[in-house]
Structures are given as C-alpha cells and as structure tokens.
C-alpha cells in the first residue's frame, strides 16, 4: 500500500517537473498565433493580422501551463511544449 502511494507520488512529481520544463515560452505562443491566424485567411495573411495580434498579446504562466490574452480574450493556451490557438468567438448577433 505505501509502496504504491510512493510510486504514485513519484510519478506525479516527475510529470510536474516535465510540465515545468516544457512550458511554452512567450515567443512560442506568439509564433504559433501568427502562423495560425495567417493560415485562416489570405486577407489576414496579407494584413499580417497574426503578427499584430501576437504583438499585443500578454503572456501568463501558471508554472505547468501558460496562456496569452489580448484584452479580456484568451487567444492561446499551452502546456508540455504544445500551443493551441483558440478559435475566435462568433459575433453576438450570429447565433
């Protein structure tokens, strides 16, 4: 019983250390945002909206994960070296 508990604690500690070590950097978030927004439309690519959004994004780290925000909107989330750019919310009248 105690051995199983110690193994579980050791595995969780190792997972936390791995998450801390591979937390995406601000540059990784900004590059992923820029690529994702540029690939969504040719107009966005032409106007370089991805670069503008990435420039104005604010990076936040919670140790094992991180996210970026532009204003009040969360733009990307990341953990374990992976960054996911969130889809834009539909306009309020589109529903």
Image (cartoon, rainbow, N blue to C red):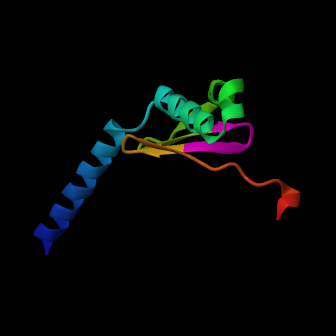
Which residue is found at the position 69% from the left and 29% from the top?
Answer: 49
Q: Position of residue 16 (x, y in %)?
A: 32, 48
Instruction: Examine the structure image and report whether residue 82 is included in the region drawn in magenta.
Output: no
The tally of labels here is: 0
10 left or right, relative to 15: left
80 left or right, relative to 92: left
Q: Is residue 24 above or below residue 19?
A: above
Kindly give the residue lying farthest to the front in the view shown. Answer: 42
Segment tinted magenta in the rendering: 69-76
Position of the N terminus, as image quadrant, is bottom left
Residue 51, quarter of the rendered image: top right
Q: Nearer the viewer, residue 36 or 92?
A: 36
Which residue is found at the position 73% from the left and 52% from the top?
Answer: 89
Q: Position of residue 33 (x, y in %)?
A: 57, 35
Which residue is found at the position 56% from the left and 38% from the top?
Answer: 36
Q: Position of residue 94 (x, y in %)?
A: 84, 60
Q: Nearer the viewer, residue 62 or 59?
A: 59
Instruction: Specify the principal SS of the magenta part.
Output: strand
Q: Is residue 7 above or below residue 58?
A: below
Residue 17, quarter of the rendered image: top left
88 left or right, relative to 64: right
């Amino acid at each position: 019983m105690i051995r199983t508990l110690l193994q579980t604690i050791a595995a969780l500690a190792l997972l936390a250390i791995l998450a801390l070590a591979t937390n995406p950097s601000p540059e990784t978030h900004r590059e992923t945002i820029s690529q994702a927004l540029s690939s969504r439309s040719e107009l966005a690519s032409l106007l370089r909206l991805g670069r503008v959004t990435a420039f104005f994004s604010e990076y936040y780290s919670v140790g094992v994960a991180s996210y970026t925000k532009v204003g009040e909107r969360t733009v990307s989330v990341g953990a374990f070296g992976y960054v996911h750019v969130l889809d834009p919310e539909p306009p309020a009248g589109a529903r």
